[in-house]
Amino acid sequence: MDLQKYYGYEDVFIIPNYSNVLTRNEVSTDVTLGSKERAFTLKIPIISANMDTITENRMINILNEKGASGALHRFMSIEDNVKEFNKVINPNFCFVSIGTNSDYKDRAKALYDAGALNYIVDIAHGHSLMMKNTVEWLRKEFKNKIMIMAGNVTTPEAVQDLESWNVDAIKVGIGPGSVCLTKDVTGVTMPIFSAIQNCSNVSRVPIIADGGCKAYGDVAKAIGAGATAVMSGYFFSGTDEIPEKAWRIDNKNQQVPIYRGMASSEAMKTIRKDNLPTPEGKSILVERKGSAGHIVEQIAGGLRSSYSYVGATNTREFQAKVKFGLKR
């Protein structure tokens, strides 16, 4: 069997290049997302993950203030989902989520009626008949009035199929997240850096790198590998803006934040109630990190510095000029 080599963020580094960038303040990290009918700009290419311990309206609002975006999770009733969406100050710059289960049509319609235009079809294995059926229904129902981001996938073949199903962006990443156990429970995964490279090489739509970022520099590696933006739960876990459900009382009677994968046993008990599958995620305690807005500022600063180290003043230049080395 001829096995190929695949790499994660931890396996690669960015090689510095000659730079005539005098200050990182002249560097732009703007990227464009959106449907064929409408597009919008993110000043900072970061989206908070659609996880129930990460993103509700408070997270989206603070990220919007900083020029980033957030993805509202779907693990609530449709009525509560609409209420939460209605609390978003600038709804045109946030994402809403649906799955492929029995209520996805009702949820999508209710959110659309509330004004939602940017949808994420979010399932563990996005290269599937369930995804195809859901995307085709969304397009038939809403035409090109909405943006559809679909995932998660890791292969060029999946990208080509999703594009043929008429999606506007593709979420890449299976198994790299810090609270994801898919790679351990099933053996199925793909190191995220190589997954981004392989998928972006064939994609005609934006690639969103989902999961695996542990250091701010990993965002630059993802963008350099071909991603348009990065989705993260890890960076925003434990911040001031996480939902109330993300707090627990520890044995010292103090409030502590948790971060959990949506396939963890704890999360599935609140979602599925019965017939629980083998968990593919876990719950962990995390440190308090302060404001999510400060986290975005730190990520943006690191990204601008990375651009300047390779002599780039914008994302397109960075992707054209960046070169990577292998640590081993």
Image: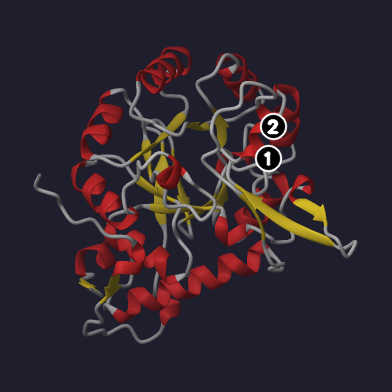
Q: How many marks?
A: 2
Residue 94: x, y in percent?
57, 42
Q: Nearer the viewer, residue 216 or 322?
A: 216
Q: Is residue 101 left or right of residue 127?
A: right
Tell me the kind of residue under disc 2. Answer: Lys
15 or 263, which is in the foreground?
263
**Quadrant of the rendering where the N terminus is positioned:** top left
Residue 95: name its quadrant: top right
Which numbered marker is on residue 225? none
Percent across and percent down for residue 243 are 74, 48
Q: Which amino acid is tagged 1?
A: Glu
- Identify the residue shown where x is 32% and y is 53%: 191
Kindly indicate the quadrant of the structure image that contains residue 262. Answer: top right
Q: Position of residue 76 (x, y in %)?
A: 70, 30
Separation of disc 1 and disc 2 at Cα? 5 Å
Q: Is residue 309 left or right of residue 260?
A: left
Label 2 sits on residue:
269
Q: Kindly identify the residue that appears in the image at 37 percent across and 67 percent down.
A: 220
Tell me residue 122's x, y (percent): 49, 33
